[in-house]
Amino acid sequence: MSGNVYIPDVVAAKVTDIDPAELGVKGILIDLDNTLLPWKDSVVSEEVRQWAAKVRAGGVGICIVSNTHNPRRLRKIAADMGVESIYSAWKPLRGGFKRGADILGCKLEECAAVGDQLMTDIKGGNRAGCLTVLVRPVDKKEFWGTKISRFFERRIMKKSGLEYK
C-alpha cells in the first residue's frame, strides 16, 4: 500500500483485465456502479459475467461492496453474476470492506479492493489494508456527488502521474 490513501497499487483499464492470480489475492471486493456496469444499469455484460465465472472457478471469491441504497437492484446483479454483495457500505469507511472479506472467509490483506473512484473505493480499500485496483469508469453518466469527486480525482491523478492502462 502506498503512503497516500488515494493512490492505488494497480491501475487497469477494466475489471475484465484483472487477474487475481497475478495479484495474489483470495478475494475481490468490487464496486458496482461504473466499475462493473454503468450507473443505475442492471444488465451485466457477458464479458463481465464470464470474467466473474473464471475468477470464481480459480478459487477466488467476489463480493460486490457498494454504497448503493437499492439492495433489490444489487441483489439481482449479484445473483446474475453468482457473487456475494453488500449494500450501504459507506465507503470510504472500512466496515463494508471488512463485512465483504468476512463473507468471503478472507482477511482484508488477502483481498483486492477494486473500483473506479479514488475518493471511495481506493481510499477505503487502502485504509482497510487491501491491495487496491483502480479501473476506468465504464460510463460518463454518474451520481452528482461523484461528479464533484471527479474534479479532485483528476488533480490527484495528474499530480501523482497516474494513468489508466
Image (cartoon, grey):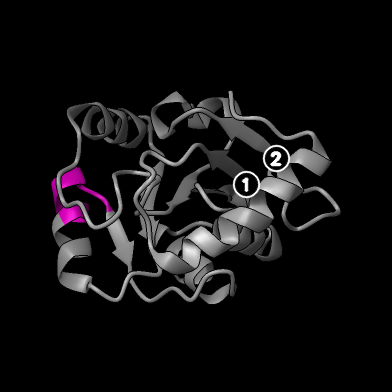
Q: Nearer the viewer, residue 11 or 132?
A: 11
Q: Count the marks: how many? A: 2
Chain part drawn in magenta: 77-83
Q: Give the residue type that dot 1 points to.
A: Thr
Q: Position of residue 4 (x, y in %)?
A: 82, 55
Q: Is residue 107 visible?
A: no
CB under 8 Å between callouts 2 and 1? yes
* 49 over 119 or under it: above or below: above
* 1 over 127 or under it: above or below: above
The answer to whether residue 152 is left or right of residue 47 is right
| Residue occupying image coordinates x 72% and y 35% | 162
Give SS at disc 1: strand
The answer to whether residue 43 is left or right of residue 47 is left
| Residue occupying image coordinates x 45% and y 24% | 17
Question: From the image, which quarter does the C terminus lie in?
Answer: top right
| Residue occupying image coordinates x 22% and y 72% | 71
Residue 21 counted in the magenta span:
no
Residues under labels 2 and 1: Cα distance? 5 Å
* 120 over 7 or under it: above or below: below
> Badge 1 is on which residue?
132
Question: Could you say which quadrant of the image residue 68 lies in?
Answer: bottom left
Q: What secondary structure do most residues of the magenta stretch adopt?
A: helix
> Badge 2 is on which residue?
9
